[in-house]
Every structure is written in C-alpha cells, then in structure tokens.
Image (cartoon, grey):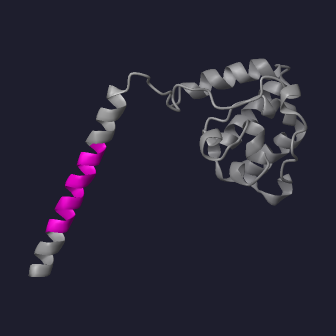
Amino acid sequence: MSTKIVLITFLSLAALFAAACGQSARQTSQSSSDPQPTPQTRVPAYFQDVARAGALPPTLPPERFIGPAQQAYKVAREIPATLAQLPCYCYCDMHMGHKSLHSCFEDTHASECAVCVSEALQAYEMHQSGMSPAEIRERIIAAYSKRQ
C-alpha cells in the first residue's frame, strides 16, 4: 500500500514540476523584448543562386530507395541546381545543418521525410513546366509557409 502512495506522490510532483516548467518557458518567451523567429515565420536556408552554392556534393543513388523517395532522389540527380536554390520546410537547416533542399538528398534524410520528398517532386513538376528556380522557390515558400 505504501508503495502506491509513494508512486502517486512522485507522479503528482512530476506533473506539477512539468507544468511549472512549461509556464516558466511561456513567460520567458512572452517577456522577451526581441522576439526570435519561429520555424513558422522564417524561411529555411537556401542558396540565392547556384553560383553561391559552389560545387554541389553528389546525392545518393536513387536505386537505394523505393516509391516516392526513389523518384525524389532521381529528381535530385536531374535538377540539383534547382534544389540547391530551394528551402526545405522540415527545417533540417536548424537541426541537421542543411544548406538547402539539395542537402537532404546528400544523405538518407530525404528518404525518411515526406516534406523533402514532396517538395522535390513538386519542384520537378514546376521545373518541367518551364519555371525558373526563383519562381519555384517563390511558389514553395508560399505553399509551405501556410502549412505551419
């Protein structure tokens, strides 16, 4: 019986502590005089033009993947310069150091991320219709900034 009381007391204290931490974090963020951009308000990293990107690292072979991921890795091989000029709205620039959507295809990240795959496939369709990388970027930013 005393074990149950100790467990209930511990869980109650843990819940109170978690609630207090959450309240403190909210108060700190609300009292900041210089609001920091949140992922929802900022555009992720990308290269303004491909010349600024320099030599792009190779992307992984599409044959390593299946389904939409394989198609997206094919796109990355076909239009690398375009993808380098696009932001990635999974915000991998913040937690993985990616420089653009192209970076997602340099490793296995894109194969595990629906956002990366979706953006690449959409970019390819727009590229095929004759849009410039800047026009594609404008459309991607408009579409994905609304999803947050």
Q: Is residue 41 visible?
A: yes
Main SS category, magenta section: helix
- Whether the magenta-drawn stretch holds residue 19 is answered as yes
Q: Residue at x 27, y 52 (%)?
A: 18
Viewer-nearest residue: 142 or 20 = 20
Q: Residue at x 80, y 33 (%)?
A: 84
Q: In the rendered view, does 2 fall on the left or right side of 140? A: left
Looking at the picture, how far across and down is residue 88, in whole percent? 67, 35
Looking at the picture, how far across and down is residue 28, in whole percent? 33, 34
Q: In the rendered view, does 101 fall on the left or right side of 74? A: left
Which residue, as the protein is rendered here, is positioned at the far front? 33
Q: Is residue 124 visible?
A: no
Instruction: Count up the numbered dots.
Output: 0
Viewer-nearest residue: 53 or 134 = 53
Q: Residue at x 83, y 23 (%)?
A: 49
- What is the magenta range? 9-22
Quarter of the image that includes the N terminus:
bottom left
Examine the image and state in which quarter residue 108 appears.
bottom right
Examine the image and state in which quarter residue 44 appears.
top right
Looking at the picture, how far across and down is residue 15, in whole percent? 22, 56
In the image, residue 6 above or below residue 34: below
Which residue, as the protein is rendered here, is positioned at the far left? 1
- Whether the magenta-drawn stretch holds residue 104 is answered as no
In the image, residue 123 above or below residue 57: above
Q: In the rendered view, does 44 fall on the left or right side of 49? A: left
Viewer-nearest residue: 137 or 94 = 94
Q: Residue at x 19, y 67 (%)?
A: 10
